[in-house]
């Protein structure tokens, strides 16, 4: 399905899952906005996705910084006027998370990126998504986000995936 009208905002887009999702969505004709901290890596993904004929923009920012995420959302809205798809692929992992070895600073970073970052981005984009899917309701038992179908996964930490179909 090719849809050049749809716009995706992808965090963690400078590599791994985020870059792969960007390439896949662009291959379907979706315009993709890449958000990540590493400008050089983002430029490579931007070049790769853009080289395949996909509309792409690279935005540098840290998902734990509300101002930087807000600036990225505003840049997408100025350029393309909408956000239809939200992909949160940013994340950090600490290989040894045992309580004996886990430093408080590592815990704080893990929670800040993996949970707070997702919350910040969701909070800035959720009303746009509701506007895009106007008139449709999606059942959920989660009281703070009525109207959305949410699936929670733990792999290895809680990540929030939103599916709007």
Image (cartoon, grey):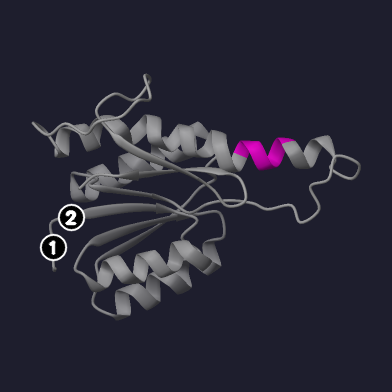
Q: Which residues are magenta?
A: 108-112
Local crowd size for mark 2, using a 10 Å CA cut-off: few (<14), some (14–19), many (≥20) = some
User: Can the viewer see residue 2?
Assistant: yes
Secondary structure predominantly adopted by residues drawn in magenta? helix
In the figure, residue 116 lies in which quadrant?
top right
**x and y, in percent, of residue 66 in the image:** 49, 32
Label of residue 6 in the image:
2
Element class at badge 2? loop
**x and y, in percent, of residue 15 in the image:** 52, 67
Residue located 52% across and 67% down the image: 16
Local crowd size for mark 1, using a 10 Å CA cut-off: few (<14), some (14–19), many (≥20) = few
Residue located 28% across and 80% down the image: 52
Q: Which residue is identified by label 1?
A: 3
- Most extreme residue toward the right, as rendered? 100
Camera-nearest residue between 82 and 148: 148
Residues under numbered marks 2 and 1 in contact, where contact means CB atoms less than 8 Å apart: yes
Q: Would you place residue 141 above or below residue 149 in this image?
A: above
Magenta stretch: residue 69 in it? no
Camera-nearest residue between 42 and 108: 108
Left or right for 141, reference 42: left
Distance in Å between CA atoms under marks 2 and 1: 6 Å
Camera-nearest residue between 98 and 32: 98
Magenta stretch: residue 109 in it? yes
Label of residue 46 in the image:
none
Element class at badge 1? loop
In the figure, residue 164 lies in which quadrant?
top left
Q: Quadrant of the N terminus?
A: bottom left
User: Can the viewer see residue 15?
Assistant: no
**x and y, in percent, of residue 134 in the image:** 11, 33
Q: Would you place residue 146 above or below residue 165 in this image?
A: above
């Amino acid at each position: 399905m090719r849809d050049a009208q749809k716009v995706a905002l992808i965090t963690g887009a400078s590599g791994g899952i985020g870059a792969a999702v960007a390439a896949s969505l662009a291959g379907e004709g979706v315009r993709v906005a890449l958000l990540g901290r590493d400008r050089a890596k983002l430029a490579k993904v931007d070049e790769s996705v853009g080289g395949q004929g996909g509309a792409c923009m690279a935005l540098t920012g840290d998902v734990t910084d509300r101002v930087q995420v807000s600036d990225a959302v505003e840049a997408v809205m100025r350029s393309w006027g909408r956000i239809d798809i939200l992909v949160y692929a940013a994340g950090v992992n600490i290989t040894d998370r045992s309580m004996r070895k886990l430093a408080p600073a590592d815990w704080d970073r893990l929670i800040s990126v993996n949970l707070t970052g997702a919350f910040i981005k969701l909070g800035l984009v959720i009303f746009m998504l509701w506007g895009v899917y106007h008139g449709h309701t999606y059942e959920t038992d989660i009281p703070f986000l009525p109207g959305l179908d949410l699936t929670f996964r733990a792999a290895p930490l809680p990540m929030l995936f939103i599916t709007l179909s």
